[in-house]
Amino acid sequence: MTLEILPMEAKYLEDAAALVVDNFRALRRRIPRLPARYEQPLVIVDLLGKLENEARGAVALKAGRLAGFLSGSMMPNFYKKRAFYSPEWANAAEEAFSREVYEALYAYLSPIWLREGCQALAVSLMAHDEPARQVWGWLGFGILAVDALRGMEPLAVSVPEIEIRQAGAADLPALGELLAGLSRHLAGPPVFLAQDFPRPADLLAKPGYVMWLAFEAGEAVGFLGMDPAYRDGCLILQDEDTIQVEPAYISEKCRGAGVGKALLEHALAEARRQGYLRCSVDFESPNILASRFWLKRFEPACYSLMRVIDMGGE
Ligand SMILES: CC(C)(COP(=O)(O)OP(=O)(O)OC[C@H]1O[C@@H](n2cnc3c(N)ncnc32)[C@H](O)[C@@H]1OP(=O)(O)O)[C@@H](O)C(=O)NCCC(=O)NCCS
């Protein structure tokens, strides 16, 4: 039975949301601490409805039944490129037809996105969905970012006894230097991602935000921020009970000595006291230090894949 590919319309939203919810339930069986709210079809219908206004998605029908869909929105500055991005709640395919559905949707939609000036295409996939990751890999997409989750339980490892305290106005110069170090780390090999960070004062002014600083011999050598209002990562990890690590950095000379673990342990204990139920983090997969550090302590929930399109010419 061949697939019929049609533009996304409001009449398909409920069936599309049902596919997303099925997929999310499968992920939540693996990671039960994920927020339950994304098992509610109406939450997803509402999100998809807002995208539908942009009319850049499509559905795949098999004998008149929705077997998959792909939707998303234009991002003017996605890793410094104009990109079309499909979040993890804006694409899904029945597992049995994953390959043919995603291939057909991508072949149909990609020329439309490129005509609108996209230089890159990106898609987030739920971490358990290995078949989808395979298909997108064959379509030329590579993992660039990971969203991961853990509970608030202690790390259960020994950490060095170092001074850790909350950053305040007097720490802004030291924090500025450490943030510049993080920027350099991300812009350099093997990450190669230039990122704009908020100014230290703007970070500290965010509602509910706490920046923990670690000191050695009176010198600030690392930081770890905890942001309850973080909204840049994948949505399905987020709700009012989730706090996000954003960002973290240990100065090069002090790495590998347990300072990162001590900061994380401290930040988790404080967030636990405040009643948070889970902690998320997102990081670039080519950031080897970060991948090693977070993946030992957090479980991947979403992978974000990207493909940069080179159309040649000037
Ligand atoms: C990721 C990062 C915050 C971890 O902080 P850290 O203080 O080095 O971490 P720790 O020392 O507590 O633990 C690092 C682990 O790597 C091991 N390690 C050994 N030598 C190391 C070295 N030279 N550098 C880093 N880690 C090393 C540690 O023994 C430890 O192993 P374990 O996980 O089995 O316990 C730090 O490497 C860093 O700032 N990286 C650059 C910035 C960055 O990537 N930030 C995260 C952005 S999301």
Image: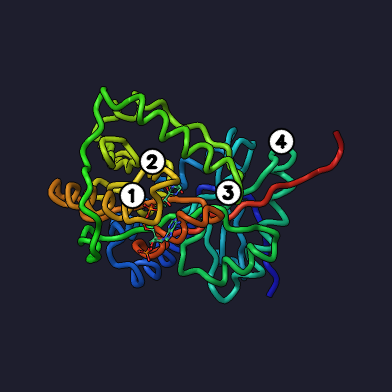
Q: CA distance from mark 3 to mark 2?
A: 22 Å
Say which quadrant the C terminus sits in. Answer: top right
Q: CA distance from mark 3 to mark 4?
A: 26 Å
User: In the rendering, at what x and y percent does residue 310 appear?
Assistant: 78, 45
Does the closest atom of ligand 1 sit within 8 Å of the Cβ of label 4? no
Image quadrant assignment for residue 261? bottom left
Mark 4 residue type:
Gly
Mark 3 residue type:
Val
Label 4: which secondary element = loop
Marks 1, 3: nearer the viewer: 3
Marks 3, 4: nearer the viewer: 3
Q: CA distance from mark 2 to mark 1?
A: 8 Å
Q: Would you say 81 lies left or right of 231 here?
A: right
Q: Is residue 150 above or below residue 1?
A: above
| Badge number at residue 238 | 1
For disc 3, the neighbor class at 10 Å (few under 14, some 14 to 19, many from 20) is: some
Label 1: which secondary element = loop
Label 2: which secondary element = loop
Count of marks overlaid on the render? 4
Does the closest atom of ligand 1 sit within 8 Å of the Cβ of label 3? yes
Q: CA distance from mark 1 to mark 3?
A: 26 Å
Label located before the other in sequence (1 or 3): 3
Residue 273 in sight: yes
**Labels 4 and 1 touching (C-beta < 8 A):** no
Label 2, on which residue?
A: 231
Ligand 1: image quarter: bottom left
Label 4, on which residue?
A: 117
Q: Would you say 215 lies left or right of 284 here?
A: left
Residue drawn at x 60%, y 57% is 59
Mark 1 residue type:
Gln
Does the closest atom of ligand 1 sit within 8 Å of the Cβ of label 2? no
Label 3, on which residue?
A: 191
